[in-house]
Each structure stands twice: as C-alpha cells, then as structure tokens.
Amino acid sequence: MHEISNIKIIFFLVSVLVITTIIGEFSRIEKIKEGMGAGGLILMFVKLVLCFFQFVFLAFYIIFWMLQFWLLWFYPQFLPWVLKYIVCAVGKFSSIPNCFLWYTMEIVGKILYLPFRITFAILDMILESFEFNIKIQDMIDEAWWFVDDIDHMMYSNGSGFHVVHYPDEIIEKCYTCDVGEFPSLPPFDMKPVNDFVKCIK
C-alpha cells in the first residue's frame, strides 16, 4: 500500500514537471511579455492544448510503428532473410575451391576487357565534347544484350547449353543466392510529425 502511494506521488511530480516544462517552452516560443492581453493568453493556451494532443497522437503513432517494426517486420521477416543470406554466404565461401577456376576466368576476362572499356569511355567523352549524341559503350552493351537474348532463346529451345554464359549448375553453385528481396519496412507516415512541427513553430 505504501508503494502505491509513492508511485502516485512520483507520477504527480513528473506530470507537474512535464506540464510546467511545456508551458515554459511555449512561453519562450511565443515570447510572452508582461501585460500580454487575455486574448493572446487564450490563443496561446488553445495552441498549447492542440499541440499537446498532437504530441500524444504522434507518440502513440511512433509506438504503434515500433511495435509493427519489431513484431511484424524484424523478427518474422528481417531475421529469416539475414539468416538465409548468412547461410548462402557461408555456402559460397566454402565452395571457393571448386569455383576458383571460374572466378579466375572472370577476373582475367574483366582485366583483358579493361583497356577496351577505357578506350570506349574516352571516345564517348570526345564525342560528347563535340555534342554528338552517340555513346559507343551503350552500343557495345546493347550488342551484348542482343547476344545474351539469342543465347537464352537457344537454351530455352532445347540446345541444353549456353554460348555466352557459364553452365547453369556453375552459376547456381558459384554465383547465385536465392535469399529473396530485402523485406520492405512498415510504411511510416510523416504527416503526424509534420503537423506537430508546424504546431510548435
């Protein structure tokens, strides 16, 4: 019983402290001067009450969003996604010895193509300086995409092999991870925040 009365006293003192702090802040914001008219005081009080309710609404909205964040997003969606990502990363790391040849081939290919890429970039800068609307690198990329489309068409029509890709089992073992898309966060509406900021200005 004694503990309950102590809690009531603490709650009362904290409430008084919060209310006096809010009033003090509004007094500072509104620049109350001696001799302020009754109308100004009434308007300030009405604004104080409205802003207080907007603050309470904002606090409840943030608490509700945090509950959604932890209970509906972090534990059921984000943690499983991270665990799948970790398992996949460990699997790819453990398969490095088996995939080393393919990784080496890809690195060597990119190194051999680097002088061409730099040349195309320089030519694109020169053409752009002369205001020619031509991008050589874009044309090369479109040509590769065209070859890639042909490769996929031939593979899907029963050829059973890729011309410009590694075999499917190599891509699956060494390159891809099926972890799904990053789970989207619960939507957060900024209107309560903006309304409260407008109110205290």
Image (tube, rainbow, N blue to C red):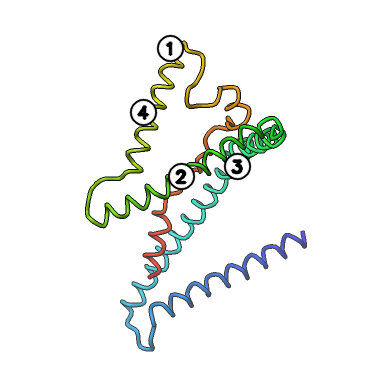
Query: Rounded to the nearest whole Å, what is the CA distance between mark 2 and mark 3?
Result: 14 Å
- Mark 1 lies on residue: 157
- Crowdedness near tag 3: few (<14), some (14–19) or many (≥20) residues, C-alpha within 10 Å: some
Query: Rounded to the nearest whole Å, what is the CA distance between mark 1 and mark 4?
Result: 17 Å
Under circle 1, the secondary element is helix
Quadrant of residue 180 within the rendered picture: top right
Indicate the position of residue 94 as horizontal and vertical percent values: 72, 34
Where 79 falls versus 198 (above or below)?
above
Tell me, for residue 74, which label it has, or none. Answer: 3
Indicate the position of residue 50 as horizontal and vertical percent values: 40, 63
- Crowdedness near tag 4: few (<14), some (14–19) or many (≥20) residues, C-alpha within 10 Å: few
Sequence-wise, the earlier of marks 2 and 4 is 4
Sequence-wise, the earlier of marks 2 and 1 is 1
Q: Residue at x 39, y 59 (%)?
A: 194
Tell me, for residue 187, which label it has, or none. Answer: 2
Q: Residue furthest top?
A: 158
Amino acid at dot 2: Pro
Amino acid at dot 3: Phe
Amino acid at dot 1: Asn
Under circle 2, the secondary element is loop
Question: Marks 2 and 1: CB-CB under 8 Å?
Answer: no
Sequence-wise, the earlier of marks 1 and 4 is 4
Q: Residue at x 66, y 31 (%)?
A: 99
- Mark 4 lies on residue: 146
